[in-house]
Amino acid sequence: MEHANTAKVVRPRGRSVAEEDAAAQVGAAAGERVGPWPPVAAIVIAGGLLIPLVVSVAGEDPFRFPKDLALRAEVILLGGALLLGWIFGRLEPLRVSLRERWLALTLLLCAWTAVCALTSMNRLVSVAPAIRVLEFALLFVVTVVSMRTLPLWIAGVIVPPAVINAAVYVLQELELWTPFDTSGAPEKHLTRTALMGNPNYVGSYLVAPAVVALALALTQRRGRVAWAAAAAFLVVATFMTHTVGAIGALVVALPVMIALRLRSARTIAIGVVAAMIAAGAAFVVYPPLHERVNVMRDALKRRDFETLSAARAMPFLAAAEMVRDHPLTGVGPGGFAYNYFEYKLRIQERHRSMFGFGGAAPDNFGEVHNDHLQVASETGLPGYALFAAALVLLASASWQRERAPSLARVLALPLVVSFAVLALSQFPLELVAATHAYLWAAAAVVARRTS
């Protein structure tokens, strides 16, 4: 993520002074970079706009699987455009240097994923998740390179589809309109799907666009009112999902962002304290969260850890047990779901008292519902170390000193904080729309950071 500022940048006709300064800040240490062939940038932007909106009117999974296919289509089109541009001389190979730490770390993540897939407890199961990591890595690198030559507002491309999803969700929550047949949902709250599938998926997806929208409102004069309105609407919609992890992510991240914008160590401390107070107030004042607190308090008195963790104690324990058994390479990408039931039986026998009279939930979990534990269980402690290093490296853009706070500085740390909190009780890395949004925001930080 580090760039030297020695490269000469020629100001194109029509480029503003602000855009010229941004281009100068990201000059390459290895020489002048070649901007992406226009179709490449168009494919990247189209993916950011369309993937969160893709659904199917048929099939058993109208929400997640179509987005998986849309991601695969975007990567195939991107690979084809890069190849054709290079063959016909329109695009040289992406000229980025391994001296840029973000690229070196991306390659290390890919390499370690391949090692874990080769040593997986079930190699066939690990093939698809390993390929998914490589797809996101390619998309991330190309998005970073593309954003270096595009205007700053491109970072907000992920906001409009999020607003559309939020609008659909709010209409469903208010029982005004729903575009899908949700008569088979086990409870009323789960009939609120937006274009994601269920309230938890919606809440997990909305966090990154909300953080980006507020960052643009705080750093950009043009369109400030629109960005602020979008951020406010996305925050309200996130609260309406009742997703504790997503609400907590915003409650912690947004005050930190405001403190960074004010550029004072004192205000950063005040922002952290304000976040803690706001979190406490939200759980006291907001009825669904207040009810959740009461349920958890009663469960704690009964030592019913299954209810206390919203039926997630078992997958948490299973993932931790997998880390203990396979600390180096984990059980392999995608291996948590494959091995879960075996570990569940072992843990339930060993810790009967933890799950109340009814025992553990009968569900065969496909995700841990905690991406920190999922990464560690599937790629081992080295894999989690690389994952943590990526978060720290991304957040480091907020340490840089600037005359005026840039988008990268204001966005970096809050984005990382929001993801770290969200991943404690959700699985954004397993949801294409949420992962895509976070990678887009991260690419904006990397492309625009000045040191």
Image (cartoon, grey):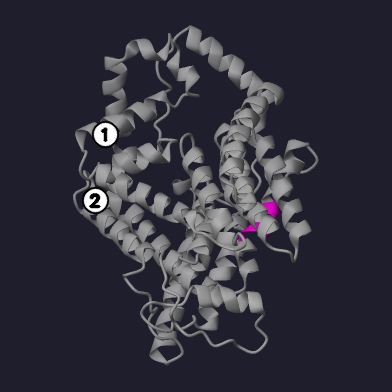
Q: Residues within 10 Å of mark 1 (few under 14, many from 20)?
A: many
Residue at x 29% of width, y 55% of height: 127
The kind of secondary structure the magenta stretch mainly shows is helix
Q: Which type of secondary structure does the marked residue at label 2 adopt? A: helix
Answer with left or right where residue 22 lies relative to residue 430.
right
Q: Residue at x 49, y 7 (%)?
A: 301
Left or right position of 121 against 414: left
Q: Which residues lie in the magenta part?
A: 158-164
Kindly tell me whether residue 315 is visible in this rendering.
Answer: yes
First in residue order: circle 2 vs circle 1 = 2
- Residue 322 is marked as 1
**Is residue 197 in the magenta section?**
no
Where is the N terminus found, in terms of image quarters? bottom left
Report how many numbered discs are placed on residues in the image: 2
278 vs 21: above or below: above
Crowding around mark 2 (Cα neighbors within 10 Å: few <14, some 14 to 19, many 20+) is: many
Q: Position of residue 19 (x, y in %)?
A: 62, 76
Query: Secondary structure beneath disc 1?
Result: helix
Quick check: is 159 in the magenta stretch? yes
- Relative depth, front residue between 151 and 368: 151
Q: Amino acid at mark 2?
A: Cys
Q: Give the quadrant of residue 15.
A: bottom right
State the separation of the CA atoms marked 2 and 1: 14 Å
Image quarter of the C terminus: bottom left
- Residue 120: x and y in percent read 22, 47
Position in image of residue 34 (x %, y %): 45, 84
Residue 51 image offset from top left, x and y in percent: 57, 60
Q: Going 71% across and 40% down the picture, which residue do you hit? A: 236
In the picture, measured across the screen, residue 356 lies left or right of residue 223, that is: left
Q: Which residue is mark 2?
A: 116
Q: Amino acid at mark 1?
A: Met
Single out the residue that lies furthest toward the right. Answer: 176
